[in-house]
Image (cartoon, helix red, strand yellow):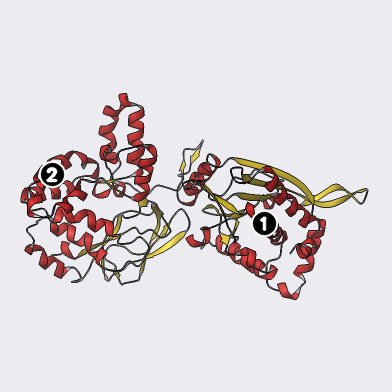
Amino acid sequence: MTKASVREFKMPDVGEGLTEAEILKWYVQPGDTVTDGQVVCEVETAKAAVELPIPYDGVVRSLHFPEGTTVDVGTSIIAVEVAGGAAPAQEAAPAAPAPAAEPEQPAEQPAARQPVLVGYGVATSSTRRRPRKQAQDPAARQAASAVQSELNGHGAAPAAPATPPAAPAAPAAPAAPAAPAQRPLAKPPVRKLAKDLGVDLATVTPTGPDGVVTREDVHAAVAAAQAPQQTAPAAQPAAPAVPAPADRPAAPASYDSGRETRIPVKGVRKATAAAMVGSAFTAPHVTEFVTVDVTRTMKLVEELKQDKEFAGLRVNPLLLIAKALLVAIRRNPDINASWDEAAQEIVVKHYVNLGIAAATPRGLIVPNIKDAHAKTLPELAASLGELVSTAREGKTSPSAMQGGTVTITNVGVFGVDTGTPILNPGESAILAVGAIKPQPWVHKGKVKPRQVTTLALSFDHRLVDGELGSKVLADVAAILEQPKRLITWA
């Protein structure tokens, strides 16, 4: 009875298409009472830190993972004993001739309510388990229950004897439900990965919860295919080692051996590394450079700081650089585009979501200002100030980092003259701004100290040729040299 009243809260997809999240902090412990909507933990995804509310009332039975553990979306992270919430379902269980239905019933209960977060209570969980609950052969149900009680890594071996008893159940029940039970369980991103790598999921040994195939399983299958002589000895120890993350202690922030320190790569840093590798080896990068006298722009910055219309707003060179880039994009709209690999099309955007690369304690993130092209200079200043403050506080939402069209990275704040920036995935151009400092410069026929900086524009050469990239960079430089062009070119 007690077991039937326990509900499992699964790691939701708090963004769009995220596959995992790291548990940063638990706000509850076993024995604590929780209510519907109460925040029980904070997790960090590849995009942001998010607090998770529990979707029902009850008492915390157990926490399945310690702080610092990275958990796949859809994996149960906390068990809550609900007072009577699952009792009716438990009473109905004897009516079905399925002893194995009792432990499965609580796991399926959350799917009956509306999810409070994107990705929570996905219908795929109940769909996968429904065929097992409809099996008519008691021996098959007992075998299925035994399989679930074993380590997930052994799921491939016991699953074979469980399949034959399920066959005679087909005449007693519709044949359609039996088919999903034979289909390998995997999340859409894992299926796509397997398809891209040419791996048949039916040949992969699953190590995830409930026999779900994980990304690591797919990669292991590829490695085994490439090195068949190592498959036999490697397969045995690999299975039991992977599927029990809850039994392992939380990974420390770093490993210090005295002579070197190893820092686990996860969360934002892990996502950034993967994105940059993917971008660098997918889009053919071209980078152009220009050094420009920005003395007049620096004078304008000081004037705007005294302007009442900018009172309380953050006014700095980045503001005018951003505005200059927006004007350059309006003059050369084809730069604001993306490459659709599947459709083999160039998608030109008629809006600009301006990304600003920001260094945070959790790593580099690129939130963007939505519809920056339509903002006045004071509005742009307000948006920049809010973006930077939110990023530094670690409160940037996942939506703020989605949908960017072009990016600015300001390496000059670190005293760096310039760099070769890597494109933000899905974008066609990124502008790097170097340090602004006094340099000898020929001005009006004489060598004088002027405020000078170097700009670097990287672009995707599949859709941006040298002429277009050069025009955009030249326009930005021309505006910063003569900021009155912000008016004449507007």
Residue 24 got which mark?
A: none
- The 10 Å Cα crowd at callout 1, few under 14, some 14 to 19, many 20 or more, is many
Relative depth, front residue between 224 and 412: 224
Where is residue 103? Give x, y as percent. 16, 57
Judging by the rendered image, the residue that carries numbered circle 1 is 329
Q: Residue furthest top?
A: 229
CA distance separating discs 1 and 2: 62 Å
Relative depth, front residue between 354 and 8: 354
Residue 405 in view: yes
Judging by the rendered image, the residue that carries numbered circle 2 is 162
Residue at horizontal 10 percent and vertical 50 percent from the top? 170
SS category of the residue bearing label 1:
helix
At label 2, the amino acid type is: Ala
Judge left or right: residue 452 versus residue 447.
left
Residue 397 in view: no
Residue at horizontal 9 percent and vertical 45 percent from the top? 165
- The 10 Å Cα crowd at callout 2, few under 14, some 14 to 19, many 20 or more, is some
Note whether 200 is above or below 65 in the view shown: above
Q: Quadrant of the C terminus?
A: bottom right
**Quadrant assignment, res 106:** bottom left
**Quadrant assignment, res 173:** bottom left
Residue at horizontal 86 percent and vertical 47 percent from the top? 441
Disc 1 + disc 2, Cβ < 8 Å: no
Note whether 305 is above or below 248 in the view shown: below
Judge left or right: residue 23 versus residue 91.
right
Where is residue 430? Give x, y as percent. 63, 50
At label 1, the amino acid type is: Ile
Residue at horizontal 22 percent and vertical 61 percent from the top? 108
